[in-house]
Image: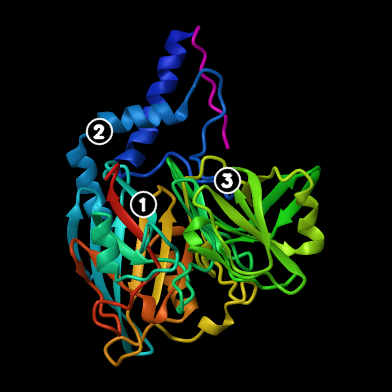
Amino acid sequence: MDTLIYNAKNYEAAKLAEIAVNISFIGVLCLCQVLLPIHAGSPKVAQVTAPDFDTVQLKQKIFSEISPETCKKNFDTIVRQKYTKASITDVTNGVKHIKLTKYYSGKPVRINVVEVDLKLANDLELTPALSSELTLKSRKSITRIAQNNNALVALNGTYFKPQSGVPLGTLMINEKIYTGPIYDRVALGIFEDGFDTARITLNAEIKGSGSRIKVNNVNQPRMLSTHVLVFTPEWGKLAPAAPKYGVGLQVSDGKITKASANAIEIPLNGYVISGPKSVLYTLLKDKDVDLEIKTIPEWKGVKHIISGGPYLVKDGEVYVDMTAQKLQAIGGRNPRSAIGYTADNNVILVAVDGREGSSIGMTLMELANFMHSIGCVSAINLDGGGSTVMYVNGAVVNKPQVIGGIPLSNAIILLKKNS
């Protein structure tokens, strides 16, 4: 990256530098592009290294001086050029709904896309949403989820356990982790000023009685009897019975209040720790415990996280790693859902219809190539198949196998800020 030096003592040189920067930036910003691409592993917009010179502030100053009408027209132009032979409608300022058909081996595939320029749509935010605010064990239609949150746009979210509705994989909403990761699957981090994607692992521990105990997961099904799990009130009224040779510890206001191998009540002001007796009994000495939950990578400032898998686009290149994320079962040609973002932080949501003669669906590689072709520098696959359903401005816009879509555990939604 070139380094741009700004010297406040030399006013004329500074003004010349500013004019040069403005000229080069305005052309890009008029097309609603960001100043520089996002670095891999960082959700922030890259900044020029210089004393007393804030590139981001300059970008915002220039952008604020550009006519909103001009930026809107340029967004319109970009979308029309990107999605040729498509039906394009305005959802609201900075939000486009695109309907198109592509052909693979001579057979049609219906695709619904929502692209959002968050610089224009600066009164909107993207967030995951659960089907119920009270419990993870819930499923509702995407229409109900959208209406409950006053959402303009909604797309089905991460994988979930069909029998219960509990999300399978990392889910964070407003900085609160509801469920932990499985199989190190890729997740999308949503920040105030950008996005990031990474394969997520949990970094959590219980501290008490001089011990530090690793927590293997939060509100997820048990995979090994030796794992230590934490169940919060969102799991439900009762935590599962402990595994063989195990125990459940009820924690209320940071203090262990009960120990039992049977199903145990989860307090509203606490949680239940479940795992091997040989590991957890050390906490009973003082009974005061502290739970700390982080992720690897440690996304500082992340507001929301939604997982999926596999990767579709990584660092600007097509990248499909379904074997590494234990997703071989979702191969083949199917209905698909995906989310990605462009170099200028436009968000792109995609729903692909499949399993019918008028739309045969996509393979993961076809989906990855499509996301790359429409400008995504990073994109991940979401739950698909029968779950694929997209809602825009009060109606389901694709054609899921079940009319209106099957009941879902969660969705990714676009709504007014503070709504």
Res. 126 mark: 1
> Disc 3 residue type?
Trp
Considering only order in the chain, which callout, 2 or 3, is on the residue closer to the N terminus? 2
Q: Which residue is mark 3?
A: 299
Using the rendered image of the protein, determine whether residue 306 is visible from the camera's viewpoint.
no
CA–CA distance between discs 2 and 1?
Answer: 25 Å
45 to the left or right of 323: left
Residue located 34% across and 27% down the image: 61
What colouring style does the render use?
Answer: rainbow
Residue located 52% across and 13% down the image: 7
Q: Which residue is mark 2?
A: 66
The quadrant of the image that shows the N terminus is top right
Residue 168 x/y as whole percent? 52, 69
Which of the pair 49/329 is nearer the observer? 329
Pointer 3 local density, CA inside 10 Å: few below 14, some 14–19, many at least 20: some
229 to the left or right of 209: left
Q: Residue furthest bottom?
A: 357
Residue 72 x/y as whole percent? 21, 46
Pointer 2 local density, CA inside 10 Å: few below 14, some 14–19, many at least 20: few
Q: Which residues are magenta?
A: 1-9
Q: Main secondary structure of the magenta part?
A: loop
Considering only order in the chain, which callout, 1 or 3, is on the residue closer to the N terminus? 1
